[in-house]
Amino acid sequence: MENQLHTSLAITTIPIQTWCELYPLETALYEGTIFPCLNLLFFKAPLSTESSKASNGKTEKEQLLSQINTISFAINDLTLYLDTHPTCQNGTTLFYELMKKRLDLLTEFADKYNPLTQFSMGIEPYSTSNYNWSEGAMPWEGGDL
């Protein structure tokens, strides 16, 4: 047993996350979380001026996609929270509010442009008349997905 390394176990303490006041959704997307109490920065790189511009210079389509991305990010972050806090009424209420808002935005985008998700295929007027998933440009064709 030559050169045997002695190892010892470390004991970690991981505090249970509590509900806290949330970032505005537009801010959350850039911070990487909807929960400011989890945002413990080691190093914060400055945002480029391009990404921090509000909606100046964006087309209506780009603005709508940005809203969908922002809401979708918040839903994903909130889902992680609810996985460990399934009885949190604040989180559950916000989850369903954001899901409705996302569905409304996906419906609006599908009506104006093309379906973004398979789920958008079940939204009128895309119900059962035809399979039109291929409508609109695909990402490799310069599409917005």
Image: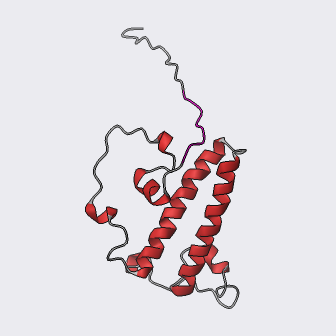
Instruction: In this rendered view, identify the residue nearer to me: 127 or 55.
Output: 55
Residue 50 to residue 82: above or below: below
Q: Position of 121 compared to 48: left or right? A: right
Q: Is residue 104 magenta?
A: no
Q: Quadrant of residue 119?
A: bottom right
Magenta-highlighted residues: 14-21
Task: Provide residue 68's location: percent of width, then percent of height.
Answer: 51, 69
Look at the image and tell me in which quarter the N terminus lies. Answer: top left
Identity of the residue furthest to the right in this view: 87
Identity of the residue furthest to the front in this view: 21
Q: Is residue 19 magenta?
A: yes
Q: Residue at x 34, y 37 (%)?
A: 42
Q: Residue at x 63, y 86 (%)?
A: 131
Look at the image and tell me in which quarter the C terminus lies. Answer: bottom left
Q: Position of 64 compared to 96: left or right? A: left
Q: Is residue 10 visible?
A: yes
